Each structure stands twice: as C-alpha cells, then as structure tokens.
Image (spheres, grey):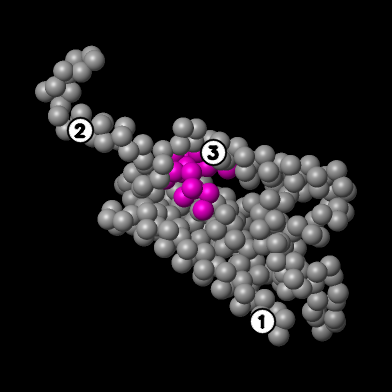
Amino acid sequence: MRPAAVGFQCPSCVKEGARSTRAGRTAYGGRRPGNAAITSQVLIALNVLVWVLILATGGRRSDLIQELALRPSGTGTLNGVPYQLPDGVAQGDYWQVLTSMFSHVAVLHIGFNMLALWVLGPQLELAIGRSRFLAIYLISGLAGSAAVLWFSAPYSLTLGASGAIFGLMGALLVVAIKVRGDVRTLLTWIGINFVITVVFSNISWQGHLGGFIGGLLLGAVVVYAPRQRRTAWQVAGIAAVAALVLIAMVTRVAVLTA
C-alpha cells in the first residue's frame, strides 16, 4: 500500500489513476470532455433556431421547408400522372440531406427529439469523446437521409433530427453491450420508439431505421477498434461508413435522374 492524501491506496489503483489523469482520455481514445453536455446543447440550439425561423416565415407554409426539408425528387409520375413539385435532391438541392436533420415544424416533433438529444447526447459524449460523438450524430443523420432517398416516395417531404437521434440510440446500445451493462432500459426505449414509428403513418420509418443502423455501425467502429493505433482504426472505419452513405446517396440520385 502507498500513502495518499487520505488513508492508503493500492499500487495498481495509483498506477491506473495516474494513467487516467495524464491521458485525459475516454476508454475509447477520445479526449475526455470538460462539459459532456455542451455539444448536445449547441445542436439543440441550432435545431431550435431553424424551428423558430420556420415558424416566423409561415410554419407549414414556409418556403424554408421546401428548401431545407428532404425531397428525393421534385419531378416524376404519381399513379401514371406526371407531377412537378419544388426541386429535390435529384434536381441539385443536395444540401437537403443535411439541413433536413435540423428542420422541424410540429412542437411535439422537435420537443421529443430535443429531449432525447438532451438525455442521450451527454451520456454518449462522456463515453467516447466529443469528436467521435459528433461524427456519429451527423453521419447517422446522413444515413437516415440515404434511407429516405432510397425507400421513401420520390415526391415525399421528410424533416427532423430523428435519424441522428436513433443513431445515438444505436451507438449507446453498442457501448452498453461492450461494457456488459444492463441494456434492458435502453432496449425498452428503442423498442417503444420503433413501435411508435410503425404505428403512425406520418413518421419516417426509413429515416429512423437508416439512422439506427448507421449508429450501430459507427458505435461498433469506435468501441471495438484495436487498442494498437486505435485512433487510426476509428478514423478509417468512420470514413468507410461515411463513404458507404455517400455512395448510397449518389447511386440513388443517379437512378432518379436516369
């Protein structure tokens, strides 16, 4: 035993404490955040700002919705009849795959999404670090957008942060499994959300499922990366998932414009 400020400590405890203090890193290589909630707070602020702008410019009738929400294509045929709507991703509005993640209209929609981000975000950031958390959030949201492009009707309009939120759920589930934690509460929450997704027809199951799968993949990349050159493995894995999402988007746009 070794003398400490109060009492004594075992040598292995001292060694582990010194290593953790010196490194300032999470168990998965990320820099330990001083405030694990700040990234989620900034994301919430961005979502609320866009929501306020949409409400101030007409709510559901706001022109911002046509610009920011995700529409796979503004032209096509519906029941054999040609239609022409405001431009979508296939017409060059590529930013919609990202801006749709920060756009809401209904109070309950943004309220539920931001509550989930407030609860889940700091937990995940504390476990893996800020940069990895932000990568999972954004790429999971884009994975949800890719699923919407492929599996939603081309003329449909989709908006909301739900794909990214489901990505956080998927990544947290992977972390919990890795540390052999009790996943029953998290699985219950995920299950309830998927049931709600299926029951209500106006909810994008495509975005939710795509974001969840993206979160699972990215979470696995972060927590199961080999210890040797862990950061390099994580960067390569995250880049590979992002590349797959991009390829899926580009391929779908090519199909819609063929």
Location of residue 257 (image quadrant): bottom right
Q: Residues within 10 Å of mark 3 (few under 14, many from 20)?
A: few
Residue drawn at 14 percent across, 29 percent down: 11
Residue drawn at 42 percent across, 58 percent down: 235
Residue 152 placed where, x, y %? 68, 69
The three-letter amino acid code for the residue at tag 1 is Val
The residue labelled by disc 1 is 255
Query: How far, Cα to Cα, is label 1 from label 3?
Result: 39 Å
| 196 or 96, nearer to the observer | 96
| Nearest-to-viewer mark from 3 and 2 | 2
The residue labelled by disc 2 is 15
Quadrant in which the N terminus appears: top left
Asked if the stretch drawn in magenta spans residue 61, the answer is no
| 192 or 6, nearer to the observer | 6
Q: Report if the CB atoms under discs 1 and 3 are less than 8 Å apart.
A: no
Q: Which residues are magenta?
A: 115-135
Q: Secondary structure at mark 1?
A: helix
The residue labelled by disc 3 is 119
Asked if the stretch drawn in magenta spans residue 123, the answer is yes
The three-letter amino acid code for the residue at tag 2 is Lys
Q: Secondary structure at mark 3?
A: helix
Q: Report if the CB atoms under discs 3 and 2 are less than 8 Å apart.
A: no
Q: Secondary structure at mark 2?
A: helix
Q: Main secondary structure of the magenta part?
A: helix
